[in-house]
Amino acid sequence: MSLRLKPFTLALIQLGNIGPSKADNLKHAREMILKAASVDRKPDLVVLPECFNSPYGHVHFPVYAENIGYSPGKPYSAPESKSESVQMLSSAAKETGTWLIGGSIPERDLTSNKVYNTCTVYNPKGDLVAIHRKIHLFDIDIPGKIKFKESETLTGGTKLSSFDTEFARIGLGICYDIRFPELAMIAARQGCQVLIYPGAFNLTTGPLHWELLQRSRAVDNQVFMSMCSPARDLSAGYHAWGHSMVVDPMGKVVATAGEDEEIIYANIDTGIFEETRRGIPVGTQRRFDVYKDVAQNVPI
Ligand SMILES: O=C(O)CCC(=O)C(=O)O
């Protein structure tokens, strides 16, 4: 059943000071969630970046990984979770009374022993209501620039994820997932009006692709698209691009951060959503009769 988009305020925390101490990372993230919520017009939804509790790199994932008590097909829980990150996020959502997309953390599935890059989502009561395991792993090699291979230690998720709030249906992805338009397209067709992907692009692909990809997914699907990055830290092993961003369904950047730690806010406006879909009705003009085979597995 589709759910009507209502106006709401989104806060993105471009978190800095992510170092080797998980306890310090969690403490700082918690302080920033409280700070993001302690403004006159409290945001409805607060978002953290990808890998906010650990340094970013495949060697770190297994070391920082936590079991979050999730088994596919079983109801989620938060209060019973033994994961210190889940406990912090759940209590911060409850304390602030806001929805919270808890960026992502390395997650270990105790049954399979596999490690995932996982986003967890909490309602204002602190219940864990959704999880997304990064589907497309960040394996790239641009000679002389950047080589990264998440698949050395991570396994890709196998499920699309979204959740319903009282103001929107929100589709989830993590970083590299944005390069695969199918994910966003399916989420939009399933009624998501807002797509939020915690991410951490880099200084090679960030300048060219970070904004381009978000504006593309927003325009393709006539949705709000947002990615939340860590702040740039040139003393860390991985240099994040920063520039956390919110794009509206016409492709306009409505909020953007710089490179440093910062909280940005965006008012999600239903007018532009409705006008875009009314004015450019691509949603009802698709020619599946012509491109019905597009979903076939034909490599480019
Ligand atoms: O796609 C990119 O260029 C960056 C992706 C990335 O940093 C990630 O998936 O963590």
Image (tube, rainbow, N blue to C red):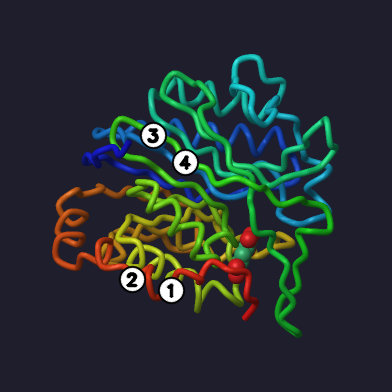
> Sequence order check: which comes first, mark 4 or mark 2?
4
Viewer-proximal residue, 7 or 47? 7
Residue underneath mark 3: 164
Closer-to-camera residue (93/129): 129
In the rendered image of this protein, does residue 276 appear above or below residue 127? below
State the CA–CA distance, disc 3 to disc 2: 29 Å
Q: Which corner quadrant of the figure contains ligand 1?
A: bottom right
- Label 4 secondary element: strand
Q: Residues at badges 2 and 1 in contact (C-beta under 8 Å)? A: yes
Q: Nearer the viewer, residue 99 or 145?
A: 99
Does residue 54 appear to the left or right of 187 in the view shown? Answer: right
Mark 3, Cα crowd under 10 Å, few <14 / some 14-19 / many 20+, is some
Cβ atoms at labels 4 and 3 below 8 Å apart: yes
Disc assigned to residue 287 = 2
- Quote the CA–CA distance across marks 2 and 1: 7 Å
Residue 202 vs 264, above or below: the answer is below
First of labels 3, 2 by sequence position: 3
The disc at residue 291 is 1
Identity, as a three-letter code, of the amino acid under mark 1 = Tyr
Rendered residue at 46%/34% (across/down):
100
Residue 284 position, x and y percent, is 25, 62
User: How far separated are the C-alphas under marks 1 and 3?
Assistant: 31 Å
Which residue does the image show at 18% across and 57% down from the upper left? 272
Q: Is residue 202 visible?
A: no
The quadrant of the image that shows the C terminus is bottom right
Write down the quadrant of residue 237 in the picture.
bottom right
Q: Position of residue 193 (x, y in %)?
A: 32, 49
